[in-house]
Image: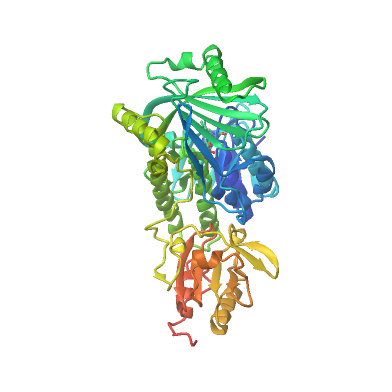
Amino acid sequence: MPLPPHVPVLIAGGGPVGLTLAALLAEYGIASLTVEADDGYCTGSRAICMSRRSQEILGWVGADRPLMATGLAWTGGRSYFRDHEVLHFEMPHDPSQRYAPMVNIQQYRVEEYAHQAMQRHPGLAALQWTARAVGLRTEPDGVSVEIESEGKRQTVRADWLIACDGGRSSVREAMGLKLEGMQYEGRYVIVDIEQESQRPVERLAWFDPPSNPGSTLLMHRQPGNVWRVDYQIRDDEDPDEAVKPENVLPRVQSHLDMIGETAPWKPLWISIYNAKCLTLDRYRHGRVLFAGDAAHLVPIFGVRGLNSGLDDAGNLAWKLAWVLKGQGPDSLLDSYSVERVHATRQNLAYGAKSTEFMAPPDFGFRLMREAALRLALVDSGVRPLINPRQSAPISYDGSPLNLGDGAQQSGDAAAPGQPAPDVLFLDGGAPRYLSASFGAGFVALALSPGAALSAELDALAAATQSAPHPLRVLRAGADGLQDTHGQLRLRYGSAAETVYLLRPDGYVLGRWTAPAAAVLRAALAPYYPCVSPAPTQKRQA
Ligand SMILES: Cc1cc2nc3c(=O)[nH]c(=O)nc-3n(C[C@H](O)[C@H](O)[C@H](O)COP(=O)(O)OP(=O)(O)OC[C@H]3O[C@@H](n4cnc5c(N)ncnc54)[C@H](O)[C@@H]3O)c2cc1C
């Protein structure tokens, strides 16, 4: 099929990050073409644990519904040292929350749901299977990308190219860029098996289990009676031998016997994995931006790979949309790189800690881990040390977008640069989540605003009505959204007349108590050129 000669946005790679980005851009009215080298969704053992934040981002394009309907929600897990339980952890959650802390689902299903979300915008989000980006030429105002499809080569000129082409990114290679960081020696066999089980959905880890002495073994349930089993192989084992079914199946059988899972089972996929902590130092190179595994490779322990890739997409989509629609400065895209490189560095630090605990890289680490596990058997105070920290959104400390903190008595959780904590309100008697307002325009959340502040916010919202994604004002207080569960007070404080400006990706831009109109206008003007700052004037209470 002939490809268009020109597109505003070309996405190289239709994996979960590329497809989600295309769907998000389409929601913002931005046309894109995604070229995917394969002829369908991914196969093999890939991501399974999707974080609360990822569910929220997928929710911006309606992909959270099928994910929640099919996925297996979980809230905690157990760790065992030999055959003793040493930890039973729970992730922060309560029944009033919109999403579970984690949902297990196969990566190919995430790709399918993101693709379905794209298909809701047939004129905007195009996908070409079996089309591979094989070369490119960058220019100051765009990129010419050579694409090979059905044995033919065509050149597509894109105003912007987004590299979502995974860990072996051809775009990265064509631009002579290299991921930097380190790779661990320890290797894991990853096996997906099919077996019926009544076991609760939890993250299960065994250190030095009797079934596989000396190894570390993880188990996760997935939809469709599928188990993910990961186990560490000895340093002296040949990885090619280790993945042979005759070596894998007895180890899995031994473990299933140990935990009393007796139903018949069969292997679906067997592969080998070793953890890497790698990143580009910048995710923007002129008109080329990198996202997902093309930008960074994060260890699977702590499940921050795809989860952070979706955060890249959520951060990039609105910024690209604002720049393309002439609503925001080009420097917004520099902030994408600053914020997401910062997030990757944090994710790598957490991922490295988890990896070193799962597969100690040297004798010293091994000794320390054994000491912690032995102590955890008898001393509950030690158990937090062995608690695996699962993926969570990273705060953008030091982001150039953060505005000064002008709030009084406000919750620290919602300071500028932090991911805006969710709140379940009652809106005229109906439940309403704050997070359901993200993924579109900016949001002004006002705590018990007086009449004058309310009027100012209305004037601001009215001034943005002709913008592609107007400002939305949410008022909490006597005549507005009801903080029935006390979550607003806990997470955002209780100082009346406090206004939080929240970014489209659900991060706090700035907050002020009793702000002057000019302060709010100045804060919004970079994103809503129609809102010009008025001369500074103290608002009358
Ligand atoms: C065993 C395992 C378990 C994991 N578990 C988790 C987990 O539980 N949670 C988590 O968050 N992460 C997990 N991950 C990591 C996760 O799988 C990756 O982070 C995720 O796949 C990244 O998505 P992506 O879209 O950036 O890249 P990919 O999924 O690699 O997609 C890239 C796409 O680009 C295509 N492509 C490549 N080159 C080109 C080209 N030149 N032109 C066009 N198309 C191209 C590829 O065919 C592919 O479809 C796991 C990974 C592994 C291996």
Residue in the image at 48% along x and 51% along y: 393
Instruction: Decide: is 196 above or below 48.
Output: above
Of 112 and 475, nearer the camera is 475
Q: Please name whichever residue, 142 or 43, is drawn nearer the observer in this view of the structure.
A: 43
From the viewer's perspective, tell me whether residue 299 is left or right of residue 489. Answer: left
x then y, percent, for residue 489: 52, 68
Q: Residue furthest left?
A: 364
Query: Of residues 55 and 136, which is closer to you in this image?
Result: 55
- Residue 179, quarter of the rendered image: top left
Q: Quadrant of residue 236?
A: top left
Which residue is painted at 39% across and 68% down in the image?
A: 404
Apparent side of residue 530 relative to residue 356 in the rendered image (left or right) = right
Q: Position of residue 185 (x, y in %)?
A: 37, 25
Residue 130's x, y, as percent? 62, 31
Q: Which quarter of the figure is the N terminus placed in?
A: top right
Residue 3 visible in rendering: no
Image vertical order of residue 430 relative to residue 217, above or below: below
Q: Is residue 499 above or below residue 356?
A: below
Tell me the quarter of the picture where residue 109 sits: top right
Please name the residue shown 64% across and 32% down the image: 40
Q: Could you tell me how many numbered marks the image carries?
A: 0
Q: Is residue 278 left or right of residue 264?
A: left
- In this view, the residue farthest toward the front is 378
User: Residue 100, how many percent across, how many down?
Assistant: 59, 48
Q: Residue furthest top?
A: 246
